Every structure is written in C-alpha cells, then in structure tokens.
C-alpha cells in the first residue's frame, strides 16, 4: 500500500514521526508531498497535491498534517472524489472509514501529540468500509460533487 502524506511548516516534525511509524509498523511506502522546511509553507499546496495523488490512484490513501488539520483538510476536500476527515481522537477516525469510506485523514500537530497521532493513524488505517446502508450516503456525496462540476 502507498500512503501520500502532506504537511505545512508547522507539522514537519510530526510528519517525519508519522512517516517513520507507518513504514516501520505497516511496511507501507510513504510518498511525501509536504515541506521539510520550517519556512512558511501554504498548506493548500500539499493538501491538493496529496488529494490529487489519491484520486489519480498514485497513492491508496492520504494523510495531512497542519497546525489544526482543518485548513489542509478543507483544501483536500475541494478535490472531487476526496472524503477527508479531521480527527483528534481514534474513534472518529475508525468510524470515518467504516461509515464514510474516507480516503484521507487530517490532524493537527498543535492539537495532538505524536503518540495520540499514531493511535489515530492506527484506527484509521485499520478501519474497513462497511458498505451496505452507508453506501447510499457515499453515493449522495458523489452526486453533490457531480452537480458542482
């Protein structure tokens, strides 16, 4: 599995922790679309880059990290086909996969510590879409996207 990861200048350290964690724990390849500098970096750039990689099947899933996770997720969610969730605890991350079939996860380097971030990533990566009753809602979201083109 390939995981795309993106970040802004606030989240450089957290990104490196999560990249290493995913590679060592899961053996997944992590493709970096973020910055490695503490110089100001606009989060929409990496949010869109990872989102495009997801919808173009260059990566299987995407993870985004900025100060809160909110801004970078908003940028990603502008890309048709993206369902990016912002989580600061594992339960929502797990249910976002099971019920909403999210293909991207975002969290904030200023909101969660590295150990909690790892738990959020674990819950999200291990969550499996349940389909059935949830699929009709995913279809409704896709229809909204089609109408907005």
Image (cartoon, rainbow, N blue to C red):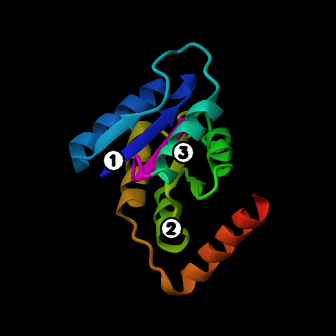
Q: Look at the numbered disc 1 and give the secondary structure of its residue.
A: strand
Q: Quadrant of the C terminus?
A: bottom right
Q: Position of residue 43 (x, y in %)?
A: 62, 31
Residue pointed to by mark 2: 101
Residue drawn 47% across and 25% down?
Answer: 12
Residue pointed to by mark 1: 2
Q: CA distance from mark 1 to mark 3?
A: 14 Å
Circle nearer the N terminus (2, 3) = 3
Above or below: residue 92 compared with residue 67: below
Are the two marked residues, 1 and 3, in contact with CB atoms closer than 8 angstroms?
no
Circle nearer the N terminus (1, 3) = 1
Above or below: residue 134 compared with residue 76: below
Direction from residue 98 to residue 78 in the image, left or right: right
Q: Look at the numbered disc 2 and give the secondary structure of its residue.
A: loop
Residue drawn 33% across and 47% down?
Answer: 2
Range of the magenta residues? 57-65
**Tag nearer the camera, 2 or 1:** 1
- Disc ID at residue 52: 3
Q: Position of residue 59 (x, y in %)?
A: 40, 48
**Tag nearer the camera, 2 or 3:** 3
CA neighbours of label 3 inside 10 A, class few (<14), some (14 to 19), many (20+): many
């Amino acid at each position: 599995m390939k995981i795309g990861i993106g970040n802004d200048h606030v989240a450089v350290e957290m990104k490196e922790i999560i990249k290493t964690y995913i590679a060592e724990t899961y053996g997944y390849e992590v493709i970096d679309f973020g910055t490695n500098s503490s110089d100001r970096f606009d989060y929409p750039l990496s949010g869109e880059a990872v989102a495009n990689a997801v919808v173009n099947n260059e990566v299987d899933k995407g993870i985004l990290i900025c100060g809160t996770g909110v801004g970078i997720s908003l940028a990603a969610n502008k890309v048709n086909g993206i369902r990016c969730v912002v989580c600061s605890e594992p339960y929502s991350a797990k249910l976002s996969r099971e019920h909403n079939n999210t293909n991207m996860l975002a969290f904030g380097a200023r909101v969660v510590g590295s150990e909690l971030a790892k738990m959020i990533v674990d819950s999200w990566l291990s969550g499996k879409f349940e389909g059935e009753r949830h699929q009709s809602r995913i279809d409704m979201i896709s229809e909204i996207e089609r109408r907005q083109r």
